[in-house]
Amino acid sequence: MTQIKFTADLLALMSRRGLCEARAADLLGVPLFTLRKWTAAQRAPSAAAVRLLEVLGLLEAVAPALLDALTPAPVAHVEKVQGKRSRKQISLERIT
């Protein structure tokens, strides 16, 4: 499988399954940085990654419920807190 075909297949799987980059990286067991390099065709996937993508495609066709079970759940978006709190404030919050 060429790098271009791998990238196309990966993006197609992400699109069909509604996966964001983070969930796709978790599904493949790679860091987000690596997935981004693959989708930008800046890094060639390993033979294991190529095979895993083929297996995931097969699972999608034969046993979609199994692939659903293997797919990581969406991560809840956490809002950042504005401003920093002192240790004293945090300690007081824990007490009350």
Image (cartoon, grey):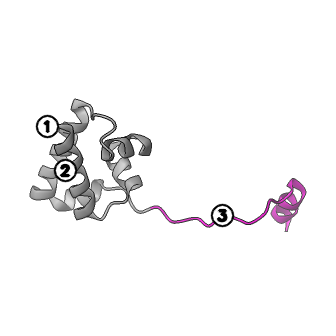
User: In the figure, 54 relative to 75: above or below?
Assistant: above
Q: Nearer the viewer, mark 3 or mark 2?
A: 2
Residue shown at the point (22%, 56%) measured from the top left? 13
Q: CA distance from mark 2 to mark 1?
A: 10 Å
Residue 73 position by quadrant: bottom left
Q: Earlier in the sequence, mark 1 or mark 3?
A: 1
Membership of 86 in magenta stretch:
yes
Q: Residue 31: horizontal and vertical position, in percent?
A: 42, 41
Q: Which residue is mark 3?
A: 80
For the residue pair 68 and 48, the one nearer the viewer reads as 48
Q: Are marks 3 and 2 in contact (CB under 8 Å)?
A: no
Residue shown at the point (46%, 61%) measured from the top left? 75
Where disc 2 sits, the SS reads helix
Q: Earlier in the sequence, mark 3 or mark 2?
A: 2
User: Where residue 9 is drawn, which disc sits there?
Assistant: 2
Q: Are marks 2 and 1 in contact (CB under 8 Å)?
A: yes
In this view, which residue lies farthest toward the left? 62
Amino acid type, mark 1: Met
Q: Which residue is mark 1?
A: 1
User: Where residue 83 is drawn, which disc sits there?
Assistant: none
Q: Nearer the viewer, mark 1 or mark 3?
A: 1
| Residues in magenta, as a range | 75-96
